[in-house]
Image (tube, rainbow, N blue to C red):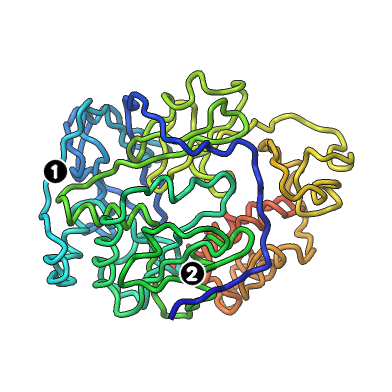
Amino acid sequence: MSKFIKLKKGFDINLAGKAEKKIVEVEQPETFAYKPSSFHGILRPKLKVKEGDTVKAGTPILFDKKNDKVLHVAPVSGEIVEIRRGEKRKILEVVILADKSIEYETFDKYTVSDINGLSRENIVDQMLGSGVWPNLVQRPYGVIADPSETPKAIFISAFDTHPLAPDYSLIFKGQDQYFQAGIDILKKLTPGAVHVNVNGDAEVSPMFAHAKNIELNKFSGPHPVGNVGVQIHHLDPINKGDVVWTVNPYGVIQIGKLFLEGKYDASRVIAVAGSEVKNPQYYKTFTGASIKRFVEGNLSNDHVRFVSGNALTGSKIAADGHLGFHDSLLTVLPEGDQYELFGWIKPTTQKLSFQRAFGLLSFLFPKKEYALDTNVKGEPRAFVQTGVFEKVTPMDVLPTYLLKAILAEDFDDMEALGIYEIIEEDLALCEFVDVSKHDVQDIVREGLNLMRYS
């Protein structure tokens, strides 16, 4: 049965530089990269290629020794020109010099009626070997789904409330048949429901509204209402021993394309946005694209930070860096490395803060857009208990006590306080509003790793 859920807790960060709703054709970047760091839980990645090898889109390039059935594949065809490593020879990126015309590995192709007759085993085998399986994220822990597990339900958030988030109705336009095919595939992987959760405050895209074999739920409220973890909490909470899977609409579409067209298609539409972008807009490209071609000559100044993903949960990358596996957004922000004496105490309308004492006048202009930089305006200090975390977390979780339990490595309290319900993005707003300047998301991941590996 469909539900309408209205949430009041949270906070919208209204940044300047939203992408204009048009898709621009540009010459494709020369290089694309596959980054194991896009996934949590890959502890021992093993390469299947070396520098100088040629690959097609869908050619396996690495796997995790802990879960060798899940293959990670090349997003484009071309030559492996570099394998970038970090400390202790950790694999950071597999860089591909792309062909001008993409060639694809071929996989089994099915009609819509054929899909209905496929067994779960057939589906899992094709998904594991083709590269689409990493789209499935398992809760608890937020890691790549374990193919040996059967989730009690699958959840898809069909809208994004992060700062400068791309418009799903635009980036997924015309993908209806692939989305439906992906849903039909996913329905065979769970005995429970496939939940598609949409924005109750906006017009619902026909792709989601008319989809079959789903439970369509509407959510309303401020960020993080678009987070799938918040939605799971209000629809079917995760208890100890439960397993659920999540996947974003892009992953559903990619799964549908695999079965209908017999190829791994990593083409996607990305948004380039932020206050420092001259022409914030959308571009057609492929997963793992180098950002160089999208930002050259398109910045108001050079003193900026590039973020693969959104400003709350994304990863800092270089000016010639590559987007992550899950990212359809490049955010460009002013670099905040300057010192501002008593900056927090000056009355101003140019600063945004959840605390009225700091962003003294921002609450008077709720629709104002802000050009915020990356300055955290302080340094880590004692854990001040203000009660503000609970005001931006629309879940029956006590973030302050949970974070303290993680820092104390108290397993019983972590479990009792809801560690199974969350991943980093669900408490990212706590990091934004924290007067103590703690790396809340890093603490959450530390707690999840403690629970998973201890």
Vertical placement of residue 70 versus 193, above or below: above
Relative horizontal placement of residue 340, taking residue 216 as reference (left or right): right
Residue found at x 84% / y 37%: 343
Q: Nearer the viewer, residue 223 or 78?
A: 223
Q: Nearer the viewer, residue 419 or 164?
A: 164
Q: Nearer the viewer, mark 2 or mark 1?
A: 1
- The image shows residue 389 at horizontal and vertical percentages of 71, 63
Residue found at x 18% / y 65%: 123
Q: Nearer the viewer, residue 295 or 390?
A: 295
Relative horizontal placement of residue 278, taking residue 204 as reference (left or right): right
Which residue is the site of mark 2?
451
Residue 247 visible somewhere in the drawing: yes
> Between marks 2 and 1, how big is the CA–CA gap?
39 Å
Mark 1 Cα within 10 Å, few/some/many (few <14, many 20+)?
some
In the image, which disc is placed on residue 105? 1
Sequence-first tag of 2 and 1: 1
- The image shows residue 252 at horizontal and vertical percentages of 32, 58
Q: Amino acid at mark 2?
A: Met
Vertical placement of residue 442 versus 340, above or below: below
Residue 65 visible somewhere in the drawing: no
Residue found at x 47% / y 60%: 204
Vertical placement of residue 191 versus 263, above or below: below
